Image (cartoon, grey):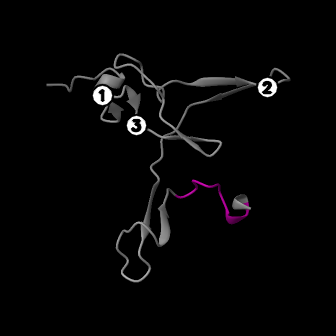
Amino acid sequence: MPKKELKHICANCQLYDMENRYCKVVILFEGKRIHPPTEPESYCLFEDEYEAIDEKGNIDKWKPEIQEVKWWVEDPNSGEKSDSGVVKIEYPIGFFGKDKESLE
């Protein structure tokens, strides 16, 4: 029997916070963490293609991409997670650009 395809709506997603009515995907924008407010019947923001038009009228089409980034703090002596110590970050290859120079 073929698998039933689910609609790409918030109520069907494990990343949806039903109680607070927002997407748990964090958008980093100008140093702030934003959770997009959505309704359970909203279509997934990350499934659509969007257009950006610059001042010259050039159109740039793009689709948001979700990437998982994890960060935590470790005690430098024990390596255990703690409230103070060394900040560790785990991110996908290419998250900050294609090469080291793109970080500068």
Residue 57, x across and y down, in percent = 81, 20
Tell me which label, 2 or 3, sits earlier in the chain.
Answer: 3
- Percent position of residue 65, x then y: 52, 39
**In the image as oriented, which residue stretches furthest toward the right?**
56
Q: Quadrant of the N terminus?
A: top left
Mark 1 or 3: the one toward you: 1
- Secondary structure at badge 1 equals loop
> Which picture quadrant has residue 12?
top left
Type of amino acid at the residue the image marks with label 1: Glu
**Distance from the alpha carbon under mark 1 to that under mark 3:** 11 Å
Give the residue type at disc 2. Asp
Count of numbered circles in the view: 3
Q: Which residues are magenta?
A: 93-101
Contact check, label 2 and label 1, Cβ < 8 Å: no
Where's residue 46, x and y in %? 48, 30
Q: SS of the residue at dot 2?
A: loop
**Residue 19 has which mark?**
1
Name the outermost residue toward the bottom.
77
**For residue 65, above or below residue 89:** above
The image shows residue 17 at horizontal and vertical percentages of: 33, 32
Task: Please give the name of the residue rendered at 47% of the width and 53% of the height, measured from the top-left corner.
Answer: 69
Q: Residue at x 40, y 18 (%)?
A: 42
Q: Which residue is mark 2?
A: 54
User: Which residue corresponds to mark 3?
Assistant: 24
